[in-house]
Image: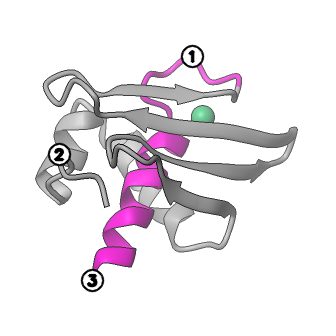
Amino acid sequence: MCQFFKGYAMTIRFAKCDYAVLSDAKALSQGADLTGLAVNNDDTCPFAQYDGTDGAYHLSVDFSDPVKPVPRCSCPSKKSPCKHTVTLLYAHLAIEK
Ligand SMILES: [Zn+2]
């Protein structure tokens, strides 16, 4: 688990209070569409793969600068962070419980 990732409050801040993204992400995280959920060796960058309708998206959230986490996703969404990267954080929260 990423040491900088501090739960729901952080997830909401990360999503920049975009409630549409947050609710989409929460719905997605209850499915089983994320595979290969893991964290890098430095424990700063959770990553996974999401099986979307257009193929697999590779997603990660880089917390190496904890003040400015960097979401990365190969989906076509113009939103940043997209629902997939927020889903990734929800999924890690679920594991930690
Ligand atoms: Zn995405």
Q: Quadrant of residue 33?
A: bottom right
C-alpha gap between disc 1 and disc 2? 26 Å
The amino acid type found where label 2 is placed reads Phe
Foreground of the two, 17 or 70: 70
What residue does disc 3 label? Answer: 97
The mark that comes first in sequence, 2 or 3, is: 2
User: Magenta stretch: residue 85 in it?
Assistant: yes
User: Which residue in the protein does label 2 denote?
Assistant: 4
Quadrant of the frame with the C terminus? bottom left
Q: In terms of secondary structure, where does tag 1 sit?
A: loop
Q: In the image, which residues are magenta?
A: 76-97
Closer to the camera, 35 or 25? Answer: 35
Q: Residue at x 52, y 27 (%)?
A: 72
Task: Please identify, in this view, whether the residue under mark 2 or under mark 3 is nearer the observer.
Answer: 2
- Residue at position x 40%, y 41% from top? 45
Give the residue at x 31% y 67%. 93
Percent position (x, y) of residue 89? 38, 53
Return the x and y of residue 90 as percentages of the image width and height.
Answer: 38, 60
19 relative position to 49: left or right: left
Element marked by disc 3: loop
What is the C-alpha distance between the residues marked 1 and 3?
A: 31 Å
Do the CB atoms of the residues marked 1 and 2 lie less than 8 Å apart? no
Measuring from the top left, give residue 68's x and y in whole percent: 21, 21
Q: Is mark 1 within 8 Å of ligand 1?
A: no
Q: Earlier in the sequence, mark 1 or mark 3?
A: 1
